[in-house]
Amino acid sequence: MRNIKRLAASEFKCGKNKIWLDPNEINEISNANSRQNIRRLIKNGLIIRKPQAVHSRDRVRKNMIARRKGRHTGHGKRKGTANARMPEKIIWIRRTRVLRRLLKRYRDDKKIDKHLYHALYLKCKGNVFKNKRVLMEHIHKKKAENARTKMLTDQAEARRNKVKEARKRRDERQTTKRQEVLKSYAKEDEVEQK
C-alpha cells in the first residue's frame, strides 16, 4: 500500500498524506502494481487527492483591526526595542521631507525669499523645528520682524532725507540772505562814493 500511495502522490504531484484510498476497494487497489494501473484507479475515483485544508485568516484580520485601534500593543506584547519597532531614522526622514516640502512651496509662492529659504533650510537640517507648526510660526515671526526692520529703516531713511533737504534749504536761505546783505552794502558804498 505504501508503494501505491507513493506512485499516486507522484501522479498527483503532491505529498503522500494527501492521497485517499477507497477503503471499500482495498483488494482492487492492492493489485495495482504499475503507474498505468494507478492512473486507471484515479480515473475510476478509487484513489483521490484530498482537498486543501482550510487555513482561515479571519482571526488574523480581526486582530489586525484591533491593533489599528491600539489594542494588543502594550509592554507585554513588544519584542523589539522602540527604535526597532519604529526607527528614529524613518521618523527623521518623514519630518525633514515635510519641512522641506513646506519651505519649497513657500518659496515658489513668493511667501519667503531665497535668503530666508536658505537660512530656514539649514535650520531644518540642524533639528531646530520639531514639526510643521513650529516652522510656520517661526516663518510668520521672521517675516513680521523683517517687515518691522524694513519699516524702521525706511522711516530712518525718510527722516535723513528730510533733515538733508531742510539743511539744504537753510543753506540756500543763508546764502541768499548773505548775498542780499552784500548787495545792500555795495549799494551803500556806491551812494557814499557819489
Image: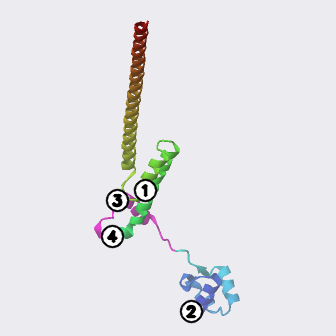
- Whether tag 1 and tag 4 are in contact, CB under 8 A, the answer is no
| Res 21 → quadrant | bottom right
Query: Which residue is labeled 3 in the image?
Result: 70
Mark 2 to mark 3 CA distance (whole Å): 52 Å
Q: Secondary structure at mark 3?
A: loop
Query: Which residue is labeled 1 in the image?
Result: 122
Q: Earlier in the sequence, mark 2 or mark 1?
A: 2
Packing grade of label 1 (10 A; few <14, some 14-19, many >=20) is few
Mark 1 against mark 3, which lies toward the viewer? 1
Q: How far from the left and from the top, in percent, is residue 93? A: 44, 61
Callout 4 amino acid: Arg
Q: Residue at x 36, y 49 (%)?
A: 134
**Is 140 placed left or right of 16 in the picture?**
left
Quarter containing the C terminus: top left
Mark 2 against mark 1, which lies toward the viewer? 1
Measured along the vertical axis of the image, is residue 175 above or below residue 125?
Answer: above
Q: Residue furthest front?
A: 193
Mark 1 to mark 4 CA distance (whole Å): 37 Å
Mark 1 to mark 3 CA distance (whole Å): 36 Å
Q: Looking at the picture, tell me which residue is in the foreground, 121 or 102.
A: 121
- Whether tag 2 and tag 1 are in contact, CB under 8 A, the answer is no
Quarter containing the N terminus: bottom right
Return the mark for residue 99. Answer: none
Mark 3 to mark 4 CA distance (whole Å): 13 Å
Q: Looking at the picture, tell me which residue is in the foreground, 107 or 75.
A: 107
